[in-house]
Image (spheres, grey):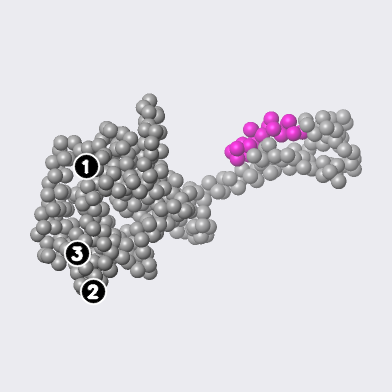
Amino acid sequence: MTEAEVDLALVRRVQQGDKQAYNLLVGKYQQKILRLVARFIRDSMECEDVTQEAFIKAYRALPNFRGDSAFYTWLYRIAVNTAKNYLVSAGRRPPSQDLDAEEASSSVAGASFVDLNTPESSLMNAELIAVIRQTISDLPETLREAIVYREFDGLSYEEIAGVMDCPIGTVRSRIFRARETLDEAMSPYISGN
Amino acid sequence: MKNQTLSSLLDGELAPDELEPALDRILADRDLQASWHAQHILRAVIQNDHTQTYCHIVDKVAAVVAKEPAIVAPDNLKSVLSSEHELPANVVAISSYRNKVLAYAAIAASFVAIVMVSYSPDRASTPHMADATNTAMPTKAAEEELQSMIVQHGEFSGAAALNGLVAYAKVVNGTTAGRAR
């Protein structure tokens, strides 16, 4: 089961009237779309507005989404068009060159994005990042290795089981416990959700 | 993180038959939804893809989407409409819209039928009484006059709500059909 299949399952639920399922899709892709929009629009408030508008447009267009492409690719196109239309309506010229969806979603591309943070949010982010790093560092070695292999290196459970020489079920349990610890550590910083 | 299934779902490591039950559980549990959002923020931080507005966009979009009508895809519409007692208010609105369209279509059909029955091309030359047995072919001018009248009156009919499609349709009556033969 791939991420695209999970997305498609959520999309089908939205198409059957489940709005809560759409919130999960927004939560999953808001960072990527915000970063994507920031390639076109420098002002952080405008970025947020355009990102929000892109998600709302996508929701309204979802009845026409047939799953021929991945949901993120489809969402990406809507976000790019929304950002470009915003620039045109504001009398500004959109960039002539587009990124492809893969490039836009990669962390390498993310490094060149504009900084969207205000001083306050930068401080908050710095604290959150520090908490995450410290929590990962404090994890028991087996949990730390499992979550690092998964989140930093992108290995599958089967690959992690091979590297750590343990059953897949153990990998599943270790990653879950690592996430549980991280979740608790992060909760004061993301209580807005 | 309250559920190991959610963790596996995030990693795309669930069996296909586990997916729908897992989504059912997440969508029914606000704590699991919060964990879903937290874990994606964690990923964004790890992948250096993190911004300050992460909390607000979900909330703002959710607020707008909550006011939108629920999506009902065509495949599902039929089954939903068959169980009227379970319809939420916004789906009832869709049902009501369908009924309006059908009503407009019926009005438009009635209008066209009345025009066809009451207007005979021969009436232009013999206004006192139409001869029901008269099967003479209408003149081109009379046919054009009929079409013109339908077009001119179309915007005042119920069919106007259907973007004028019915009003502008070519009218085929017995005489024109007979001429076609």
The image shows residue B82, relative to residue A121, as above or below, that is below
Answer few, some or many: residues within 10 Å of disc 1's Cα (few below 14, many 20 plus, some between 14 and 19): many
* Magenta run includes residue B44: no
Residue at mark 1: chain: B
Marks 2 and 1 on same chain = no
Answer few, some or many: residues within 10 Å of disc 3's Cα (few below 14, many 20 plus, some between 14 and 19): many
User: Visible in this render: residue B133?
Assistant: yes
Question: Please, what secondary structure does the residue beneath circle 3 have?
Answer: helix
Q: Disc number at residue A167?
A: 2
Q: Mark 3 or mark 2, which has the lower sequence index? A: 3
- Give how far across and how far down residue A151 sits, in percent: 23, 57
- The amino acid at mark 3 is Ala
Q: CA distance from mark 3 to mark 2?
A: 12 Å
Q: Disc number at residue A76?
A: none
Answer few, some or many: residues within 10 Å of disc 2's Cα (few below 14, many 20 plus, some between 14 and 19): few
Residue under the point 56% across and 48% down: B99
Q: Disc number at residue B52?
A: 1
- All told, the count of numbered labels is 3
- The amino acid at mark 1 is Gln
Residue at mark 2: chain: A
* Magenta run includes residue B160: yes
Q: CA distance from mark 1 to mark 3?
A: 28 Å
The image shows residue B52, relative to residue A185, as above or below, that is above
